[in-house]
Amino acid sequence: RASLTMFASSSRAAFAPKLSPTSSRTPSRASRPAHRAVRVHAGPFDGIQKAIADNKAVLAERESAKRASPPGVPPPPIVPEITPATFGFVDNAERMNSRASMVGWWALLLVEGVAGKGLLEIFGFTVGKGINFTF
């Protein structure tokens, strides 16, 4: 390890550095560059992310244009705050419908369990024995 010798048979040996006994195999920090350039390759999703960002910018521009006054009309002194609807044909309707159906389902099971009969039998309709599975 005292020195790095050159071998005549190797073509790379002519370019190999000569190391003294006190030097190490890695270059010192002073000879290294302060920072390394990081090369970022475009991935398959970079185009999609850019398209999404562009679409969001276009939608934000359209939304601001909706609220803008027409040319020559001054903006109103007070802009009303419109709260989103919570009843009727809105996004919340599906949630309310599912909750009501769950309450109805459990109420039906409770009535059939207490009466010991099915709903049609409670209303007076004659029903058969069904398939008659026995366990």
Image (cartoon, rainbow, N blue to C red):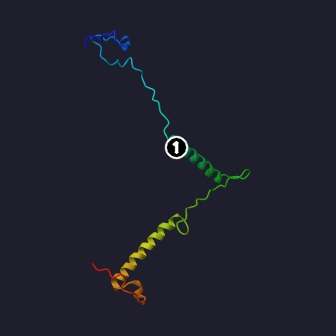
Q: Position of residue 88 (x, y in %)?
A: 55, 69
Q: Residue drawn at (44%, 73%), measured in percent from left and top?
A: 101
Q: Position of residue 25 (x, y in %)?
A: 31, 17
Q: Residue drawn at (58%, 61%), measured in percent from left and top?
A: 82
Q: 109 or 79, which is in the foreground?
A: 109
Q: On the rendered structure, is 33 left or right of 133?
A: right
Q: Position of residue 98 (x, y in %)?
A: 45, 69
Q: On the rendered structure, is 23 left or right of 83?
A: left
Whether residue 16 appears in this view of the structure is no
Element carrying mark 1: helix
Q: 51 or 89, which is in the foreground?
A: 51
Instruction: Determine whether 5 is above or below 98 in the image.
Output: above
Residue extending farthest front? 9
Q: On the rendered structure, is 12 left or right of 21?
A: right
Q: Residue drawn at (51%, 40%), measured in percent from left and top?
A: 46
* Callout 1 crowding tier (Cα within 10 Å): few <14, some 14–19, many ≥20: few
Quadrant of the image containing the N terminus? top left
Q: On the rendered structure, is 68 left or right of 117?
A: right
Which residue carries the number 1 mark? Answer: 49
